[in-house]
Amino acid sequence: MQADSTKQNLVGLSQPVLETFFADLGEKPFRARQLMQWIHQRGADGFDVMTDMSKSLRAQLNEVAEIALPQAVSEQRSVDGTVKWLFAAGGGQAIETVFIPEPGRGTLCISSQVGCALNCAFCATGAQGFNRNLTSAEIVGQVCYANRVLPPRASGDPAVSNVVFMGMGEPLANYRSLIPALEILLSDYAYGLSRRRITVSTSGIVPQLKRLGDDCNVSLAVSLHAPNDELRSRLVPINSMHPIAELLQACWAYAAKRANRYITFEYVMLKGINDSLQHAEQLAALLRDKPAKINLIPFNPFSGSDFERSSVATIEHFQRRLRDLGLIATTRKTRGDDINAACGQLAGKVSDRIRVRLGDRKRRVAAS
Ligand code: SAH
Ligand code: SF4
């Protein structure tokens, strides 16, 4: 971000916070709505264009505030139309954002942290370690940037129709920035996305999951990846703190708040690790008769990873068994892997502050 630390960046402020900001300037609450439209819908990158505000207010805004968006360090385009940006995150670090075009929709996969502390065994971001949380401006800024540089959809609507928090980081570990970012994505004065079109993906930080259900009940994806605690704790270490039973209980409570809207359970297919038919049966037993959909993700390798992707036939058998047992199961199409933009491949540039080393990960998995 090119932020001037003496000025207030308005990109990540939700409507109530902006209303307070304007009240402090002696202005009416409707200024907040005007400003949000200028930034998030009308592409303003400064205050001078805001001709529906008085000259003196614009001068005041120039003095105390700014509109600072993430700065793209690089842009890569896949043969399948997927676009990946690397955004500077200060201190030589960077986060990644991926745009996935499909007929009638455009999905933006955004990051919530510089790295991730949760250290899942099969994830490139986890292998990088953790540096810091993104601000709400940096989270929303990814969407703002994409809509500004990508052509609108055929309908004339902005390019981004769906947002998924499946880039770098664990969104629920950055709750304080996540909530204002979600409020801005949902706001009619900004992106106007419905709760259905925003998906928060989590590896299962249960206390924040419960809070999210009350604060901002958007669509939820849960990274399950294993059907029993012994295996899941090896693959997704947070499971030792919040085991499967506790996680699922929180999931069903979350779903109940939105009239049993489905929760997606992500399950990365790792050859010889979690992909047997017995695993499929265990998984079905956990999720049967619940508002659950299973999304199988073929493992995407990255440099230094220990795992292999399950074969196409194994994934098909696994999916069929789940369906035979009455579950809704789909397999995620791998997109953008020629530019390392597929799930779990986003590594950005992270200088680890908590000293998680790849060697530790290898020992943990090997010891199992
Ligand atoms: N931290 C959140 C969101 C980011 S990861 C979470 O874990 O849910 C988004 C999804 O990609 C998760 O389901 C994650 O488990 C999955 N993933 C991570 N590494 C992967 C890899 N190498 N191949 C396929 N999927 C992966
Ligand atoms: Fe973090 Fe999600 Fe990667 Fe696990 S899978 S290390 S929670 S980003």
Image (spheres, grey):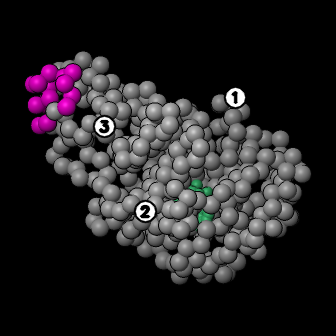
Q: Which mark is residue 43?
A: 3
Quarter occupied by the C terminus: bottom right
Question: Would you place residue 259 above or below residue 116 in this image?
Answer: above
Which kind of residue does numbered mark 3 sit on?
Gly
**Start and end of the magenta stretch?**
49-63
Residue 207 seen from this side: no
**Residue 69, image x, y percentages:** 30, 47
Of pointers 1 and 3, the one earlier in the residue sequence: 3
Mark in the foreground, 1 or 2: 2
Which kind of residue does numbered mark 1 sit on?
Ala
Label pair 3/2, CB-CB below 8 angstroms: no
Please state which of residues 318 and 175 is positioned toward the viewer in this rendering: 318
Crowdedness near tag 1: few (<14), some (14–19) or many (≥20) residues, C-alpha within 10 Å: few
- Asked if residue 225 lies left or right of residue 300, the reply is right
How far apart marks 1 and 3 lie (CA) works out to 36 Å
Disc 1 marks which residue? 259
